[in-house]
Amino acid sequence: MKKDKSKTKRFRPKLHIRKGDNVYVLAGDDRGKTGRVIEVIVKDLRALVEGVNIISRHTKPNTANPNGGIIKKEAPVHISNLALIDPKSGKPTRIGRRKEGDKNVRYSRREGNALIK
């Protein structure tokens, strides 16, 4: 059985999605929703997206939440189920990488324009 390369220390996959990107959900219960990426979990190839994949956590009372109760929060979504939204057209797009000068730059495969952060 082959070992999953994303779990080993020396292999770090190139992810097309970064923190702060606006993304479109391609698959799952929240298909069609859009949101901003809060956090990217590289080890699991997942991302937390604002307002997408909301779950309910039942918590006991603690110092942070003295009453306890049910808390709604985002659960991670797999990177393959997300597409970056092109800032120019506002539509979901695939991402490519190309060299511009001495830097690698992400660009929109739909429009061809560079995505600069």
Image (cartoon, rainbow, N blue to C red):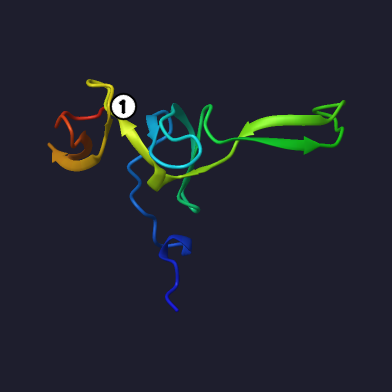
Quarter where residue 74 is shown: top right
- The x and y percentages for residue 5 are 41, 65
Task: State the residue in front, 104 or 81.
Answer: 81
**Furthest residue toward bottom:** 1
Task: State the residue in front, 27 or 88.
Answer: 27
Q: Is residue 16 above or below residue 23?
A: below
Residue type highlighted by circle 1:
Lys
Quarter where residue 112 is shown: top left
Identify the residue at image location x=25%, y=39%: 94
Quadrant assignment for the N terminus: bottom left
Number of dots carrying numbers: 1
Quarter where residue 37 is shown: top left
Quadrant assignment for the C terminus: top left
Q: Is residue 12 above or below residue 110?
A: below
- The x and y percentages for residue 54 are 60, 33
Label 1 secondary element: loop
Q: Is residue 112 left or right of residue 54?
A: left
Q: Is residue 75 left or right of residue 79?
A: right
Q: Is residue 91 left or right of residue 110?
A: right
Identify the residue at image location x=16%, y=28%: 113
Identify the residue at image location x=80%, y=28%: 64
The residue at which mark 1 appears reads as 117
- The x and y percentages for residue 13 are 36, 54
* Local crowd size for mark 1, using a 10 Å CA cut-off: few (<14), some (14–19), many (≥20): few
- The x and y percentages for residue 110 are 18, 33
